[in-house]
Image (cartoon, rainbow, N blue to C red):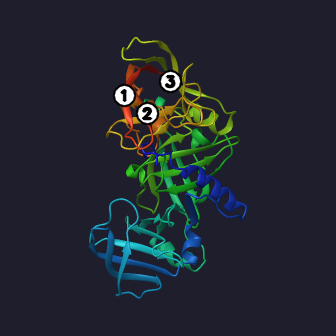
């Protein structure tokens, strides 16, 4: 088996968009061998058990034991229960945890109290899973379990534009269904030039990263005339009045200015160049330099463009050094190896915003940057061989 050095960017945004579109049409979420998608309303209405328990102890394997404090369906209050934790760090003793079971799994979804709401982690045997919109409020549990409407979710977001950090940050306001994350968003000059209000979806807990660093990411998907954009942000914080607040970045496809947001949503698809410079393969910095561009393609994917690496799509690497981002690309059609890896001296500006945002943030100073290029080769049943391959020297190109 090939060693798992790279992790494909998780398909959260695409799945949320597809599930949302099918929900509007009355259909089912897309069938995927590796990802299960469900709606909070369906999860709760079909659940065999819905209980909030207070954690008394946490086992080494992550199993939580505690006492039921609120029972919507199933085990009565006061009963001792044990549930496996799903996700990264398990909650500490004293935390309130919501567990939801169905006829197949117990728990099917679980989440710790974040101050009146629960961030849900779901599971499917041998597969990934996500519940839309990914959060549920305490007050919504009983009505949704009974198949009744629950109060909408209000979200206010400040939008960070990487190439307009010197200007006042625009803001957007959105309202989403507690049942499935469907809703709408308005945003002054940033979003109101097109359809008003714009159709939007909310997905919490799954950004564009490769690991648990984005486990609390907020994703607001916005639909335009010709395209769809995902604004990926910081964890939701509940504020006075019951609304939630976050800071988001237009991350997929990446847009670094207000004009770019409008083009991505309402204009024809087009490439957006992040950087230009030279690529040098070989042990010396001056070895065989050739022009190179780093860009976000019309399809929204991060690409390196040169005579040698034409239109190749990098993938995010597992196990990167904190504060750095590693992207890799293959130059052999139909083969994963040999793999060329670029080590970039920056992390995504908001966890979960992905490698394109990390590159844009690294180049935001307007200076030339030189990044090492590594080559990874693999022969079956042998360790991956990593050797220096050259350098990439680039300067950022601002997006207007």
Count how many numbered circles sit on residues in the image: 3
- Left or right of 29? Residue 139 is left
Q: What is the C-alpha distance between the residues marked 3 and 2?
A: 35 Å
- Give the CA distance from mark 1 to mark 2: 9 Å
Answer few, some or many: residues within 10 Å of disc 3's Cα (few below 14, many 20 plus, some between 14 and 19): some
Q: Nearer the viewer, residue 269 or 341?
A: 341
SS at badge 1: strand
Q: Secondary structure at mark 3?
A: loop
- Residue 8 pos. (x, y %): 50, 45
Image location (x, y in percent) of residue 117? 43, 67
Viewer-side label of 1, 3: 1
Return the residue found at the far front: 381
Tell me which corner region of the image, top left, top right, bottom left or bottom right, holds residue 152. Answer: bottom right
The earlier-in-sequence mark between 3 and 2 is 2
> With respect to residue 37, does 326 lie above or below?
above
Crowding at dot 2, Cα within 10 Å, few <14 / some 14-19 / many 20+, comes out as some
What residue is pinned by disc 1? 387
Front residue (pair 303, 213): 303
Say few, some or many: other residues with alpha carbon within 10 Å of mark 1 (under 14 / 14 to 19 / 20 or more): few
Q: Name the residue rendered at 31%, 71% in the picture.
A: 95
Indicate the secondary structure of the residue bearing disc 2.
strand
Q: Which residue is mark 3?
A: 398
Residues at circles 3 and 2 in contact by the CB criterion of under 8 Å:
no
Residue at 39% in and 38% down: 384
Residue identified by numbered label 2: 377
**Disc 1 versus disc 3: distance between alpha carbons?**
33 Å
Of the residues tagged 3 and 2, which is closer to the observer? 2
Please say if 257 is above or below 156. above
Counting residues from the start of the chain, the first of labels 1 and 3 encountered is 1
State the image coordinates of residue 77 (x, y, percent, origin top left). Answer: 38, 87
Q: Depth check: 271 or 268 in front? A: 271
């Amino acid at each position: 088996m090939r060693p798992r050095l790279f992790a494909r960017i998780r398909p959260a945004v695409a799945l949320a968009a597809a599930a949302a579109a099918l929900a509007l049409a009355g259909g089912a979420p897309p069938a995927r061998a590796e990802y299960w998608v469900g709606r909070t309303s369906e999860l709760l209405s079909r659940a065999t058990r819905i209980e909030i328990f207070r954690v008394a102890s946490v086992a080494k394997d992550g199993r939580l034991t505690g006492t039921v404090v609120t029972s919507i369906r199933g085990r009565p209050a006061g009963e001792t229960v044990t549930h496996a934790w799903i996700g990264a760090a398990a909650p500490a003793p004293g935390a309130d945890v919501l567990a939801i079971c169905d006829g197949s799994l117990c728990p099917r979804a679980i989440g710790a109290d974040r101050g009146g709401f629960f961030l849900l982690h779901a599971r499917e045997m041998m597969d990934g899973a996500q519940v839309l919109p990914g959060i549920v409020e305490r007050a919504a549990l009983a009505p949704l379990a009974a198949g009744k409407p629950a109060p909408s979710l209000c979200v206010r977001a400040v939008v960070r534009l990487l190439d307009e950090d010197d200007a006042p940050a625009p803001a957007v306001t959105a309202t989403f269904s507690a049942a499935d994350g469907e809703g709408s968003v308005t945003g002054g000059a940033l979003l109101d030039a097109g359809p008003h209000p714009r159709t939007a979806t909310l997905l919490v807990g799954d950004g564009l990263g490769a690991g648990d660093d984005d486990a609390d990411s907020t994703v607001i998907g916005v639909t335009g005339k010709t395209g769809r954009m995902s604004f990926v942000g910081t964890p939701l914080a509940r504020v006075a009045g019951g609304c939630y607040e976050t800071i988001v970045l237009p991350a997929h496809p990446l847009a670094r200015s207000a004009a770019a947001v409008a083009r991505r949503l309402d204009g024809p698809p087009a490439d957006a160049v992040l950087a230009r410079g030279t690529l040098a393969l070989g042990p010396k910095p001056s070895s065989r330099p050739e022009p190179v561009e780093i860009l976000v393609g019309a399809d929204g994917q991060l690409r390196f463009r040169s005579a040698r690496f034409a239109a190749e799509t990098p993938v995010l690497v597992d196990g990167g050094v904190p504060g750095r981002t590693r992207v890799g690309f293959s130059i052999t059609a139909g083969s994963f190896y040999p793999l060329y890896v670029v080590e970039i001296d920056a992390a995504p500006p908001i966890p979960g915003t992905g490698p394109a945002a990390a590159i844009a943030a690294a180049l935001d100073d307007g200076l030339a940057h030189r990044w090492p290029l590594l080559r990874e080769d693999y022969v079956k049943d042998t360790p991956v061989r990593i050797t220096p391959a050259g350098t990439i020297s680039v300067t950022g190109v601002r997006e207007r």
